Image (cartoon, rainbow, N blue to C red):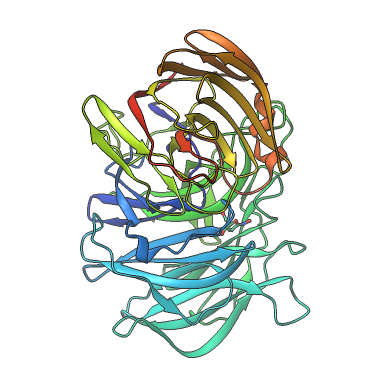
């Protein structure tokens, strides 16, 4: 049997949503307070994905300033109908939905429209186009009854005016209860409406549950097989945990596959964030059956019948780079890039002079050659392993030292310094299951244990980013850090 390796999108890519147009699959994921927002990927075989663009790549589409890294853009859904692509998503603040919106495009590579706000409570919006062309919007919110804590609701979307119209229908309160029912998606199969959702929270009790109805507005009947997919009952030797938040797609030759999020803990903690896993699905009279042969998400899975095993995807060009909450001043210069020093430290909720990419492999190596002449003792530039604004480690060149600094619980602690005389240094990070080792010109300044960067320790919804930064820590500055090279290699 020919197989592929899961996850198909490693690194922090939570809440996947997928759609197909002809032979082309498109997938979007959450992006939180990273800028640009909502990475959009393309594939022809479901296994190999290439990033096409970001859906939100203009600052006016994306007001992220002041937000915690795990707030911001949550759980987008992508659909296509009659030549128009739609993405619905929510801007979260203080871990709650604050604005749900829709954006549209004729071409998934963009340009995408400015967000059109929808009059919708809650989070995890989705769209379903029925056979008659009507479009139905679903989302989850706090329950308005004692059936709670959460409920899934539905309203029609007028796609000409991009407005929710008609009555609100409360569809379902979930199968498992106790925790919010979220991540709804609707599908129609043999005349019946199938609703899937995530329950149990996005951590170890995560799961996919289902209900069905004969009319799109309900009443919905719980699928008694729920949860249809979960790893909540699997022991610590299971390599994949926290499985849930799925979306389904049919291939041109009639298979169905699910994309779902999951994590890969080591000794109980995970650092790479919630990743995208591909799971086979079959349909029976009862509804979808996830992973019919094993009931589980697996690291090695049989290839979709449309896939050859060979990648036709070309590497994306530079789209893996993000900043925090807004664009930063980084520009090409002779032999590299210049990153303009910013006043914001990495610990604030503003836009620090930071650019980074997801860590996608537990074992990896980062090497950067950085030229920097600090004009003030408060100025620093270097590498960062970034989990969130209050949980990161920097290896920086200052006026006359290289400094290793750990940020946690509101405090920055210098754990090692090394004098330097030159203005250009090679900084490296070696990461593996045990920890992250920080070196200057091949000499170690120290190792920080891997679990420090884990979601279990730091909280929140994101995985680790590896990046470059330059700050004057509040002082006026005209300095620039010269990035001669930055190299990320899996090991
Ligand atoms: C996502 C929701 C969730 O919108 O986390 O815990 C949110 N559940 O489904 C952010 O990924």
Out of 72 and 155, give the one closest to the viewer.
Answer: 72
> Does residue 223 lie above or below 441 as drawn?
below
Q: In the displayed structure, does residue 146 sit left or right of residue 208? A: right
The answer to whether any part of residue 284 appears in the image is: yes
Q: Position of residue 52 (x, y in %)?
A: 27, 47
The answer to which image quadrant residue 369 occupies is top left
The answer to whether any part of residue 294 appears in the image is: no
If the image is split into quadrants, where does the N terminus sit? top left
The answer to which image quadrant residue 162 occupies is bottom left
- Name the quadrant where ligand 1 sits: bottom right
> Does residue 110 lie above or below 139 as drawn?
above
* Residue visible at 46% across and 36% down in the picture: 469
Q: In the displayed structure, does residue 107 sit left or right of residue 138? A: left
Q: Position of residue 390 (x, y in %)?
A: 65, 43
The answer to which image quadrant residue 248 occupies is bottom left
> Does residue 273 lie above or below 461 as drawn?
above
Q: How many marks?
A: 0
Q: In the displayed structure, does residue 169 sit left or right of residue 340? A: right
Out of 469 and 36, give the one closest to the viewer.
Answer: 469
* Residue visible at 39% across and 71% down in the picture: 102
Out of 286 and 359, give the one closest to the viewer.
Answer: 359
Q: Position of residue 287 (x, y in %)?
A: 53, 60
Out of 26 and 121, give the one closest to the viewer.
Answer: 121
Q: Position of residue 347 (x, y in %)?
A: 60, 45
């Amino acid at each position: 049997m020919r197989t592929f390796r899961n996850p198909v999108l490693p690194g922090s890519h939570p809440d996947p949503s997928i759609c197909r147009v002809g032979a082309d699959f498109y997938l979007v994921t959450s992006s939180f307070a990273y800028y640009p927002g909502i990475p959009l990927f393309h594939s022809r075989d479901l296994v190999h994905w290439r990033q096409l663009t970001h859906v939100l790549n203009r600052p006016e589409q994306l007001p992220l300033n002041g937000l915690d890294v795990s707030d911001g853009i949550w759980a987008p859904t992508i659909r296509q109908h009659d030549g128009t692509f739609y993405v619905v998503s929510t801007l979260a603040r203080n871990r709650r939905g604050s604005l749900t919106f829709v954006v549209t495009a004729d071409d998934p590579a963009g340009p995408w429209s400015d967000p059109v706000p929808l009059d919708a409570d809650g989070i995890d919006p989705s769209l379903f186009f029925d056979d008659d062309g009507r479009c139905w919007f679903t989302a989850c919110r706090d329950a308005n009854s004692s059936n709670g804590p959460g409920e899934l609701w539905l309203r029609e979307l007028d796609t000409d005016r991009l407005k929710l119209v008609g009555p609100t229908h409360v569809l379902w309160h979930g199968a498992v209860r106790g925790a919010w029912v979220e991540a709804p998606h609707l599908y129609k199969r043999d005349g019946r409406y199938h609703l899937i959702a995530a329950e149990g929270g996005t951590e170890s009790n995560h799961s996919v549950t289902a209900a069905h109805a004969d009319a799109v507005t309900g009443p919905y009947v719980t699928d008694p097989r729920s949860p249809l997919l979960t790893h909540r009952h699997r022991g610590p030797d299971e390599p994949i945990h926290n499985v849930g938040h799925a979306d389904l797609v049919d291939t041109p030759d009639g298979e169905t596959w699910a994309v779902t999020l999951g994590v890969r803990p080591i000794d109980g903690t995970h650092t790479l964030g919630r990743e995208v896993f591909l799971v086979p699905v079959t349909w029976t009279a009862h509804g979808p059956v996830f992973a019919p042969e094993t009931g589980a998400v697996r690291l090695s899975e049989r290839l979709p019948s449309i896939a050859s095993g060979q990648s036709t995807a070309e590497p994306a060009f530079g789209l893996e780079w993000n900043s925090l909450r807004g664009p930063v001043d980084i520009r090409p210069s002779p032999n590299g890039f210049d990153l303009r020093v910013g006043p914001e430290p990495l610990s604030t909720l503003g836009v620090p002079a930071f650019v980074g990419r997801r860590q996608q492999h537990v074992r990896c190596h980062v090497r950067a050659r950085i030229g920097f002449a600090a004009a003030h003792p408060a100025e620093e530039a270097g590498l960062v392993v970034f989990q969130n604004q209050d949980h990161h480690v920097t290896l920086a060149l200052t006026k006359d030292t290289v400094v290793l600094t750990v940020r946690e619980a509101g405090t920055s602690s210098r754990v090692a310094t090394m004098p330097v005389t030159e203005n250009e240094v090679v900084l490296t990070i070696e990461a593996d299951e045990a920890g992250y080792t920080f070196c200057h010109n091949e000499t170690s300044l120290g190792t920080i244990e891997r679990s420090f960067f884990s979601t279990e320790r730091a909280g929140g919804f994101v995985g680790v980013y590896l990046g470059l930064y330059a700050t004057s820590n509040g002082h006026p500055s005209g300095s620039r850090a010269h990035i001669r090279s930055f190299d990320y290699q899996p090991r």
